[in-house]
Amino acid sequence: MINIDGIEYRTAAQWEKKHRHVLKGQLKKGVERSWRSPNGNETMMFYNIEQTRTWAKKDVEAVNRRRRADAKAKREAEERERIEGAARAEQHRKDLLDCWGAHIDEETLQEGRRDHTAYQWCDLGFVPIAEARWRLTRYGGNSAWYYCSPWDVRYDPDRAKELLETGPREYDRLPDGRPYDGRPWWQA
């Protein structure tokens, strides 16, 4: 808003907020002002109240329709996010079950030949080799468990059973270099 000789001039957007339209014949006939801003030169057209008209009933209804449509779109987006969040939570639960070996067997292991957690390998009778390459990622995401590949393990059911019961006493550090704190070693 600018004030020229005691008359208020506003931009078209400012008049819309006051529930007034600039008359069709008055567009581009307002007072033009330019100034420098951090984004470069700015130019605006300003109009006085005689160059505007109040909103008609159809204008109010159009604004109300737009508001209702925006509110509906927001509700639908929230509902979609809720459904997707529930699906993500379910997938996370399945991943946790998979990590703890709830439904893995050697047949599944040989078919898929995919990475598994140290717990899963031990549960199947395999132990990680000393040069195993450990990763905290699986399928491109982050995880709370260390994963290693089939070529990073060897079959040793007695040692695997011992590891599951007692944990690895020989480890002072976890695979990523952090000090071993006594928690189950297959968890991050």
Image: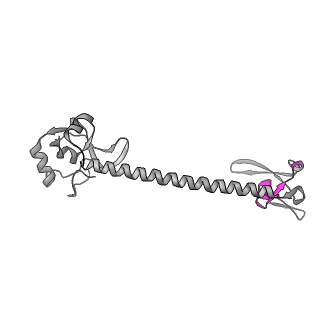
Q: Position of residue 2 (x, y in %)?
A: 82, 60
Q: What colour scheme does the image use? A: one colour
Magenta region: which residues? 12-24
Left or right side of 42 for 173:
left
36, 182: nearer the viewer = 182
Which residue is rendered at x = 68% and y = 51% of the image? 38
Left or right side of 104 for 93:
right
Q: Position of residue 19 (x, y in %)?
A: 79, 60
Q: Position of residue 133 (x, y in %)?
A: 25, 40
Which residue is rendered at x = 47% and y = 52% of the image? 83
Which residue is rendered at x = 11% and y = 46% of the image? 159
Please identify the quarter of the rendering in which residue 48 is found: bottom right
Q: How many marks?
A: 0
Residue 91 lies within the magenta run: no
131, 149: nearer the viewer = 149
Q: Is residue 9 visible?
A: yes
**Residue furthest bottom as drawn:** 6
Q: Position of residue 188 (x, y in %)?
A: 28, 52
Which residue is rendered at x = 57% and y = 56% of the image? 75
Left or right side of 83 for 23:
right
Q: Is residue 11 visible?
A: no
